[in-house]
Structure formats: structure tokens, C-alpha cells
Amino acid sequence: MKRSKRNPCYTRWELTGAPMTPQQAFNTLIRGRVAHELNTVHDVQLAVAPRLLRPMLYDLAATGLWERHAKHGYYRLTDNQCHTFQWDSTGTVLEHYKADHPDDQCPQVTDPPHETRAFLPHFDTRPPLPEPGTPHGWRGILRRAASLPLTFLPTAVTFYGRYHFGYQDIGAATFAHTFHAMADEAQTVYGRWETTPGHHFVKDRSGLIWTITTAPSEHSAKPAVTSIYPPRGALTDHPEHQRATRAPGSSTLATHRRLA
């Protein structure tokens, strides 16, 4: 007898053995929309979301539940608390990310669990290493990003790392360090920001100047940090940086200074 989908006893998803190792999950092909789906749920912006996907997959592939769709053969991985990833029927392409609520609102996880696989992405042991006690694993970063009053665009993270730490590139060994340093400053910058429409320049405690826009960024209701500038008069304050990062029609930092 054919089972009706309206029957509460009918389950489309069935538990199955792991179709891949954690390392294979880490290396899987990821559709571009998956980072947008992670961003939409947790409001962490695209400077953060793509950095977290592979560490999440590695950890959950080892500890989560694997299921397979009874009809279509899709694979699904869930932590049975908040996060769900869905592959195609071959198990080679990650198609979707879903969650019922942001991770920091998950009723079943009150604190980030101890994460032994370190920083982002895994297996990179180059300095600078995260300082002891830093929540550098994916869940600590995801929760902190979701709780911040501001979101960070990729250009902002890149230039903060350059001007604050001297990093020429934000890669595996530098992202977590840079993100947490920005997060430490975000509340202060947000408190100094005038919540009026348009672009604003706000100085943090180290003298760096943050550009904040009230225009909603993609999939986010939070004000967005679009870029970071060095302290006034610094030799690294290049006009081409402003031209590359400012919104069309907005004033440059040089114009802002002339008006100040």
C-alpha cells in the first residue's frame, strides 16, 4: 500500500551511514547560494559566512546525524539542534543550508562546546595562532557575529587586518584573529555612530576609521561596516582605496576631512 505524505508516521528522511568522511565533507563542492543561506539565518554577512562553512562541515560530519531522502536520495547532515546541510543525491555537491533559528538562540546549546580542531580552516598551523581562551572555532565566531550590532563586509575585514595587524591578506591563519579584534571594537564604534541615514566615518579606540552605512546590506537588517581607513595622515591612506570601496555618489574620506 502506498504511504501517504499526510500520514504523520510517514518519514521522508531515513537515518543512514555516513556517505563521506569529515575530510571529504570539508572538501565538498559548495554551491554559492549556501553561504547566502547561512548569512540569511544568522545575519553574519558574507565576510564571515563563507569562512565558517567548511569547518562546520568537518565537525558535523564527525558528530552529526546523516539522513537520506527516501524518494529522491538526497543526503542530509544535521546536528539535531540547529544546523542542517543538504547534498545532492550523489553526495558530491552541497546544495542547501537550513536552520530553524540562529545558533545563538538555540535552546539546546547554551554555550559553545569545547572545540579541539582549532581555527579556520582546520589543519593550518601557521602563526599567528589564536591566543588561549579565544573562541576561535566556528561556533564561537558564528555566535559572536550573530550577536554583534554591526555586520562586516569582506573589504572591511581585509583592511582592518592590514592596518591594525599588518596582514597583507586575510587567510586561514589570520581570519579568526582579525574577526575577534574587530568584534572587540564593534560595540564601541556602534556606540559612537550617529544612527542617521547615509554613510558615516567613526573612529575606533586605536584611531582607525570605520565606514558605516545605514543602507541595508544584502540579506541583513544591521548597519554594515563597508571599509576601514588608517588614522588621519597615515601614509597608507591611498585615494584608490576610497574609490574602490565607496558607494557611488558618496563623499570620499578626503572630502569628509576637508569639511571637518
Image (cartoon, rainbow, N blue to C red):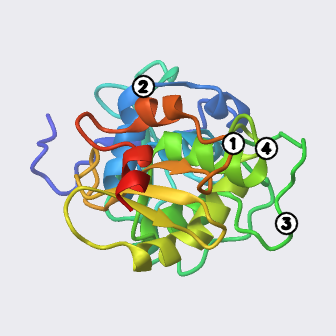
In the drawing, what numbered circle is on residue 5? none
**Residue that numbered label 3 is attached to:** 131
Q: Amino acid at mark 1?
A: Leu
Report how many numbered discs are placed on residues in the image: 4
Q: What element does badge 3 sit on? A: loop
Which residue is nearer to you in this view: 196 or 23?
196
Coordinates of residue 118 in the picture (x, y in percent)? 79, 55
**Residue that numbered label 2 is attached to:** 31
Per the model, the C-alpha gap separating discs 4 and 3 is 12 Å
Which residue is nearer to you in this view: 94 or 125?
125
Q: Amino acid at mark 4?
A: Ala
Which residue is nearer to you in this view: 30 or 199?
199
Coordinates of residue 49 in the picture (x, y in percent)? 48, 45
Q: Quadrant of the C terminus?
A: bottom left
Coordinates of residue 144 in the picture (x, y in percent)? 53, 68
Q: Quadrant of residue 97?
A: top left
